[in-house]
Image (cartoon, coloured by chain):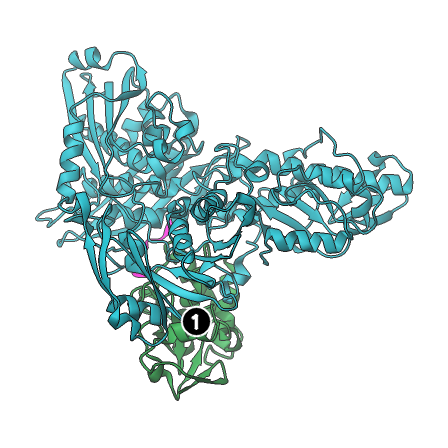
Amino acid sequence: MTAISRREFVTVLAAAGGGLLLGYRAEGTQRAASTAAATHGTTSVSFAPNAFIRIPPVGSVTLIMPQAEMGQGVYTSLSMLLAEELEVTPDQIRIEHAPPDNKLYANQFFGEQLTGASSSVRAFYDPLRRAGATARTMLVGAAAVSWNVDPASCRARKGVVTHTPTRRTLTYGALASKAAALPVPDKVTLKDPKDFTLIGTPLKRLDTRSKVNGTAQYAIDVRLPGMLIATVAASPVLGGTVAGIDEQKTNAVPGVRQIVRLDDAVAVVADHMWAAKQGLAALDIRWNDGPNAELSTTDVVQGLAKASATAGVAARKDGEPESADAGAPTKVEAIYEAPFLAHAAMEPMNCTVHVRKDSCEVWTGSQVLSRARTTAAEVTGFPLEKVIVHNHVLGGGFGRRLEVDYVTQAVRIAKQVDAPVKVVWTREEDIQHDVYRPYYYDRMTAGLDPRGTPVAWTHRIVGPAIIARYLPRAFKDGKDVDAVDGAVQLLYDIPAIRVEHVRQEEPVLNTGFWRGVGVTHNNFVVESFIDELAAASKQDPVAYRRALLSKSPRALAVLDLATKEGQWGAPLPRGRGRGVAVLYSGWGSYLAQVADVEVMASGEVRVHRIVCAVDCGQVVNPDIVRAQIEGGVVYGISGALWGEVTLKNGRVEQSNFHNYRVVRMNEAPPIEVYLVRNGEAPGGIGEPGTAVTAAALNNAIYAATGKRLRKLPLQPGLVSSTR
Amino acid sequence: MVTLNINGKSHQIDVPPDMPVLWVLRDVLGMTGTKFGCGMALCGACTVQLDGQAIRSCVTPVSAAAGKAMTTIEAIGVTTAGKKVQEAWIALDVPQCGYCQSGQIMSASALLARNSRPTDGDIDAAMAGNICRCGTYGRVRAAIKRAAQRASISGKGARS
């Protein structure tokens, strides 16, 4: 896979097209369709009927990827959507990262070029199929004109148009110039799903080869002539500033070229990372810690607890929970807590920047490429068109690369360096200056009737409103749709429900999205609490849920599948237990998970087996869906069992993988994924596997020990006796 | 001046003797297939082989590599075990983001070169030092077993 920048892209096209007018000039905002119209009469022109497809007269069909590849397989699944309708085979295509352009490449759910919220296939399922069908229709039209026949008598397959009666053929490349001269049709016919040859098949990932031989290019692999390498230390306390530095020892380190001082960080610029790291270690930096210097995790929790006493913004209200609750013979109340979490993507944050006299070029890995470009323009003061940004495959996203803080910082550093500079964070910097999943504090109440059936349910979520900062245009009437998504979408048939959010910002750390977003903490609470209700009613957790899901056949189907395959009810050895969790949210996918865990006498939890049933509607690539569930579950186990970022005197106490523990090979359980295949609209799949895991583990720990945990990470402590 | 033998080729490099191999590979020689993950031998992303042993290049000073044969991801496919491992990785579509996979493959290849029939326990022991945040562990395990099986079917063993 080769990455071509916009600038190179324009050059390539211009070379191929011999001076033709291009749609992708400067801003790239003009519709590519006009490219085709503008090229009427030229020979050997690339055919680019839309922003996603370019077919040169000779060579591979280029598919331009609007979403970032961060392991979730979008380059393969989005290519399948295009190729299915375009009628090309995977070996006929090459892939290119889209340049930053919110008009051409916006994700329709966000109105900007954003890869996140498990939305790529959902957002592009129709647009990319239409883009492919449009191109195919025009290529068939061009062939029909060439042969002076009815387009209906022609058929496109594998990059070739055939006139069926006479068996004459023309390749897409040969038709490119002619197709480029045709008007872009307003309406095209999409394939009937029964005729799909790619969508729904386990096509091999297109990026695997480059990822097993070391050739895949991540942002951290960028190399430029004259490039220097920097590593950075930002104020260990958020809001702190640099009070002073003693440069003497650093300047003595061989290979160190420059020390760059920002108001809140210091970078050492060197010939290589080793010199930069040595130089930074030798640097004596004095910090003004600022207003957060005294704060610790307990202060944050106290603030949340206090805020939880007040009513929040209603996110869902069915019936009158208070009066229903008042009449219920059994009441259950609980407080749940979920800690700050770091993302710890394997590729540490990095960004390469070359600030020239009147322009700026940026090489990075981003889930929000246009935001990367905007921040570079803001920091340099250059107009947007003077900022070129190149994206790369991401060494993990998980929501961390939805932020552009590391791009902003790198541009600020590069402004002071007279060369291209690659700013690479150490793992310590990465863990201690993350944009963390917030701490959440939830209050639950339920009223049960004499048979144990819930008649009232209230859920108060206390924590920041990430949406208010990140997507202010979507923050309406004080409602953060993300913070409550997995709570609002409660499927259980309960007559009186109230879900509310109390906004409590935590200035001591920057907080943002973490794989599974709001649903991850919501589902932990909801699915643990429904388990509590089953226990309070002395009912089987699966039977209890089934009785409340009669109006949700898709949820019931995955629950039945997961419990069947997970051998729910079969005996387990002492110390072992099975737990279940069900998930539905705005992603549009239904999941049920059965976790089989063992709690050792030491309190250490060992996960023996995970069974996950998934209904994500129309599946584009079942093997990628499986991989996303497998990986999502592992990410969820790390977070649920060990994930915790704590603060002392304003500083993050964790720093690397020895004290920010994550799942390793010897701790990873077998994970079985069972897919329900149907023709429903495609649902998101990158995050649900993570989001459904914590509650399943928690409920399994309860089944194993009789101990009910309400706080993440799940640490049962010493277990004296097991049930 | 240090002389390194990397992938069968000799390199004369003028770097401090305590400079870790990782940065020599990446920043001096431009061999970026070997990745930086933690800098403390905690994650395995930087794994290369020295005389067939999987080592963490982020904590291995370049002086310790002198006089030894180093193999990196760029050339592991030349070894019998490495080729089988890469083929198995492709057959099972192991990588997701792929960032840790160079290290996973270097550790797996070293394992198979000395143990053509690894048990689950052997795999745990050899691979526990390689973190994958995308959670590809199940496929890594399956791919190692597949590579072992293929190696024995071919009758040549996995030793290289």
Tell me: residue A325, above or below residue B53. Answer: above
Q: Residues within 10 Å of mark 1 (few under 14, many from 20)?
A: many
- As drawn, the residue found furthest toward the front would be A357
Tell me: residue A721, above or below residue A564. Answer: below
Tell me: residue A330, above or below residue A515. Answer: above
Q: Is residue A296 magenta?
A: no
Image-based side of A688 in relation to A646, left or right: right
Which chain: green? B
Q: Which residue does the numbered mark 1 point to in the structure image?
A: B27
- The residue at 68%/33% (across/down) is A190
Image-based side of A433 in relation to A675, left or right: left
Q: Is residue A667 magenta?
A: yes
- The residue at 46%/37% (across/down) is A684
Q: Quadrant of the N terminus of chain B?
A: bottom left
Task: Residue A379 in the image: state x and y as whole percent.
Answer: 42, 47
Q: In terms of image quadrants, where is residue A230?
A: bottom left
Which chain: cyan? A
Task: Residue B149 in the image: state x and y as whole percent.
Answer: 47, 69
Image-based side of A28 in relation to A139, left or right: left
Q: Secondary structure at mark 1?
A: helix
The span shown in magenta is A663-671
What amino acid type is highlighted by mark number 1? Asp
Tell me: residue A443, above or below residue A230. Answer: above
